[in-house]
Image: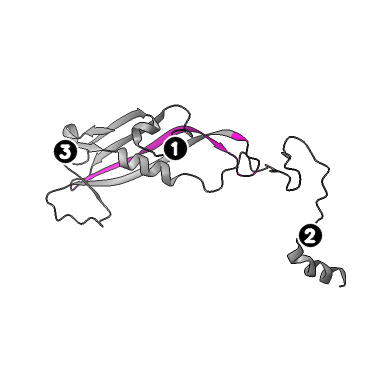
């Protein structure tokens, strides 16, 4: 995912639009190839800021995940915005802790930025819907599909003393 900067390199304020299509394997996302259904599309623009370049855009992908509550697989559409600033590296003493990324030459490689944006946007709690009822803790039935006849009033033995306290009030 390289962008040729020559057309906009000399004029401050100029910009260039870009669009790429890649697979998770081409982006080097380890172990995530199975999640993504089809290609990953990246659209955006690069802007010449004078001392550097600003890259902004959106990543579009379709991914399949297992629900954390009911374990059923489901598809979701991802729309992930990204933004970063780049400066041309002039020497080897550039600060690696700087807020700005560095590049060399007339091309800007966005592969690392896209990979990082996809990995950071991975949801922590993946559910098929907000109303997902999950699995029965007794029999393992998917409560979204059918109701089970398991007794749900069982009290955790560690909390039984609290239940006894509430009954005597």
The verdict on residue 154 being magenta is no
Element carrying mark 2? loop
Q: Which of the 4 image quarters holds residue 71?
A: top right
**Residue 114: in sight, yes or no?**
yes
Q: Position of residue 14 (x, y in %)?
A: 22, 37
From the viewer's perspective, is the residue at label 3 or at label 2 nearer?
Answer: 2
Q: Is residue 57 left or right of residue 53?
A: right
Residue at position x 70%, y 43% from top? Answer: 135
Decide which of 77, 168 is in the foreground and name it. 168
- Which quadrant would the N terminus be assigned to in this image? top left
Reply yes or no: does residue 55 show up in magenta: yes
Which of marks 3 and 1 precedes in the sequence?
3
- The C terminus, quarter of image: bottom right
Q: Which mark is residue 11?
A: 3
Number of residues whose C-alpha sits closer than 10 Å to that of mark 1, classed few (under 14), some (14–19) or many (20 or more) = few
Residue 116 image point, x, y percent: 37, 44
State the extent of the magenta-drawn residues as a range: 50-73
The CA span between labels 1 and 3 is 39 Å
Q: Is residue 142 left or right of residue 110?
A: right
The residue depicted at 54 percent of the width and 37 percent of the height is 65
3 or 2: tag closer to the N-terminus: 3
Marks 1/2 in contact by CB < 8 Å: the verdict is no
- Above or below residue 11? Residue 19 is above
Coloration mode = one colour
Q: Which residue is mark 2?
A: 155
Q: Quadrant of residue 111?
A: top left
Picture mark count: 3
Dividing the picture into quarters, in which one does residue 3 lie?
top left
User: Is the stretch drawn in magenta largely helix, strand or loop?
Assistant: strand
Query: How far across and how far down the image is residue 77, in percent?
Result: 51, 34
Residue in front for this viewpoint, 157 or 92: 157
Residue wearing tag 1:
32
């Amino acid at each position: 995912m390289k962008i040729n900067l020559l057309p906009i390199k000399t004029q401050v304020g100029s910009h260039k639009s870009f669009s790429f299509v890649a697979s998770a394997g081409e982006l080097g996302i380890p172990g995530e190839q199975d999640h993504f259904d089809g290609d990953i599309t990246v659209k955006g623009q690069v802007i010449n800021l004078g001392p550097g370049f600003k890259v902004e855009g959106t990543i579009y992908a379709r991914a399949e995940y297992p629900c954390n509550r009911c374990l059923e697989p489901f598809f979701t559409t991802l729309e992930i915005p990204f933004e970063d600033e780049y400066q041309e590296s002039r020497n080897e003493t550039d600060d690696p802790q700087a807020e700005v990324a560095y590049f060399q030459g007339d091309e800007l490689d966005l592969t690392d930025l896209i990979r990082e944006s996809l990995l950071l946007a991975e949801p922590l709690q993946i559910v098929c819907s907000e109303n997902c009822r999950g699995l029965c803790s007794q029999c393992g039935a998917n409560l979204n599909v059918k109701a089970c006849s398991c007794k749900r009033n069982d009290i955790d033995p560690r909390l039984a003393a609290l239940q006894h306290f509430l009954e005597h009030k």
